[in-house]
Amino acid sequence: MNFADLGAIKYIIQNCRARDRAEIEALYGLQFTLECAPAWASSACLVEIFDHNGQPAAFVAAHRVTETVCQLSMIATEDWRHVAASVIKWAKREGMPALYAQGFKRAECRSIEGHPEAIRFLMHLGFEVEAYVKSYGRNAEDFIQFAYTRRTPVHVFQRPQNPASAQAAHA
C-alpha cells in the first residue's frame, strides 16, 4: 500500500455516499474509520481504487478472516455511477480470480439494511443473502450478510440408453 493509495482511500471515506456514511457510522464511526485507515489498508490482501475524472471514486478491499474466507468492503463517492461498470468488470475478471489465487473459497460482505445500491451491486456480482443480522450496528442498526462461494460445476452422469452405447463409450 503506497501513500497515494492511502490518500485516495481517505478521500473516498471522507466524501462517500450518504448510505455508505450511515453504514460507517453504524459500524465504527467516521473519525475512528479515518484514524484506522492506514492499518486497515496495509492489512488488506487486496485493494483496488477506481477514479473518475482524476478523482478517487470508489475502492474495494478484501481482508483475510480465515485461511479460506475473506471479508470484502466497498465504499464509493457520489461518482459511483460513473465507475460502477468498471468495478463490476474488474471484480469479475480480476478481483475474484485474484482472491481464488490466494486460496479463498468464500467472500463475505455485510451491508446496512436499506442500502439499495450496495445490495444490487452484491447481487449482480453473484453474492447471495445469507442472513439478516439484527442490531449489528452500534445503535442497533440491522445489517444483511451476503456470501459468495466458488461453485464448481456439477457434472451429471447420464446413463446410456442401451448396453451397446455403454460399451462404445468405454472403448
Image (cartoon, grey):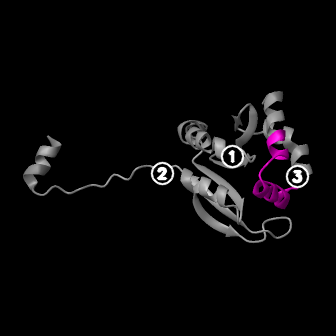
Q: Please tell me whether residue 6 belongs to the stretch shown in magenta.
A: no
Q: As rendered, which of 53 and 50 lies closer to the eye?
A: 53
- Counting from the top left corner in percent of width and height, residue 117 is at 65, 56
Q: Is the Cβ of the residue at disc 1 closer than 8 Å to that at disc 3?
A: no
The residue located at (62%, 45%) in the rendering is: 84
Label 1 CA crowd tier, 10 Å (few <14, some 14–19, many 20+): many
Which residue range is magenta in the image? 10-30
Q: Earlier in the sequence, mark 1 or mark 2?
A: 1
Label 3 CA crowd tier, 10 Å (few <14, some 14–19, many 20+): some
In the displayed structure image, the side of residue 76 where residue 103 appears, left or right: left
Which numbered mark, 2 or 3, is in the foreground of this view?
3
Q: Which residue is mark 3?
A: 30
- Counting from the top left corner in percent of width and height, residue 142 is at 75, 69
Quarter holding the N terminus is top right
The residue located at (14%, 50%) in the rendering is: 166
The residue located at (55%, 38%) in the rendering is: 97
Q: Which residue is mark 2?
A: 151
Q: Earlier in the sequence, mark 2 or mark 3?
A: 3
Q: Is residue 155 above or below residue 62?
A: below
Q: Amino acid at mark 1?
A: Trp
The residue located at (70%, 36%) in the rendering is: 52
Q: Amino acid at mark 3?
A: Leu
Q: Earlier in the sequence, mark 1 or mark 3?
A: 3
Element type at marker 3? helix
Quarter holding the C terminus is top left
* Residue 80 badge: 1
Which numbered mark, 1 or 3, is in the foreground of this view?
1
